[in-house]
Image: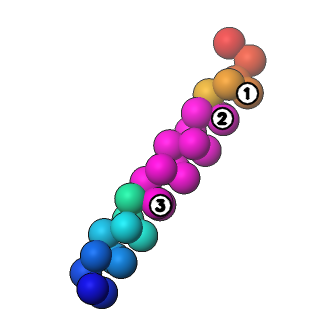
Amino acid sequence: MFAQQQHHQKQTTKTNKNKTLNKQAHELPF
């Protein structure tokens, strides 16, 4: 159970990181 939670946490972090990167990419001037 705990291992599943950890895996889900990693996936969530990864997704959030990708969202942040995409947001930054859209805000770049070029």
Mark 1 and mark 3 in contact? Answer it, CB < 8 Å.
Answer: no
Mark 3 or mark 2: whose residue is earlier in sequence: 3
Task: Identify whether 30 is placed above or below 3.
Answer: above
Q: Secondary structure at mark 2?
A: helix
Give the residues drawn in magenta, as a range: 12-24
Q: Which mark is residue 13?
A: 3
Q: Where in the figure is residue 9, as x and y percent of width and height?
A: 42, 70
Reading the image, the residue beneath label 2 is: 24
Q: CA distance from mark 1 to mark 3?
A: 21 Å
User: What amino acid type is highlighted by mark number 1?
Assistant: Glu
User: What amino acid type is highlighted by mark number 3?
Assistant: Thr
- Tell me the residue at 61%/44% (across/down): 20
Q: Where in the figure is residue 27, as x and y percent of width and height?
A: 73, 27
- On-image quarter of the C terminus: top right
**How many marks are shown on the rendered structure?**
3
- 18 vs 29, left or right, is left
Identify which residue, 25 or 11, lies in the foreground: 11
Q: Main secondary structure of the magenta part?
A: helix
**Crowd rating for badge 3 (residues with CA inside 10 Å; few <14, some 14–19, many 20+):** few
Task: Identify whether 15 is placed above or below 25.
Answer: below
Reading the image, the residue beneath label 1 is: 27
Residue at far top of view: 30
Say which of marks 3 and 2 sits in front: 3
- 15 vs 27, left or right, is left
